[in-house]
Amino acid sequence: MILDEADQMLKLGFKEDVDRLLQTIKAHVTSDLQFMLTSATVPRWIKDMANSYLKPNWKMIDLAKDLKAKT
């Protein structure tokens, strides 16, 4: 499952909807499930929310970490 612009969905007040969607999928999928959250910005609260759904050893890939202007 891939959520693009997850931070914007949550910032706009869709946290309950995202939670319900993720919980429903998790409850109905019996095979190993892969979650991917993509976003141009990853504030701390997104990382905290990701901990609720992603495996304990999840990895964050920052493609712009060495850029001076990340916009």
Image (spheres, helix red, strand yellow):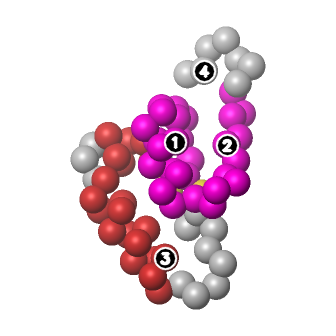
The residue under label 4 is which amino acid type? Lys
Residue sitting at x 36%, y 48%: 9
How would you rate the neighbour count of disc 4 (Cα within 10 Å): few for under 14, some for 14-19, many for 20 or more?
Answer: few
Query: Where does the C terminus fall, quadrant-wise?
Result: top right
The residue under label 3 is which amino acid type? Lys
- Near-viewer residue (68 or 56): 56
**Pointer 3: what residue?**
26
**Pointer 1: what residue?**
47
**Pointer 4: what residue?**
70
Q: Earlier in the sequence, mark 3 or mark 2?
A: 3
The kind of secondary structure element at disc 1 is helix
Q: Earlier in the sequence, mark 1 or mark 2?
A: 1
**Horizontal and vertical percent position of residue 29:** 54, 84
Q: What's the distance in space between the residues labelled 1 and 2, CA to CA? A: 9 Å
The residue stretch that appears in magenta: 37-64
Q: Is residue 20 left or right of residue 31?
A: left
The residue under label 2 is which amino acid type? Met
Image vertical order of residue 47 relative to residue 29, above or below: above
Q: What's the distance in space between the residues labelled 2 and 4, CA to CA? A: 16 Å
Q: Earlier in the sequence, mark 1 or mark 4?
A: 1
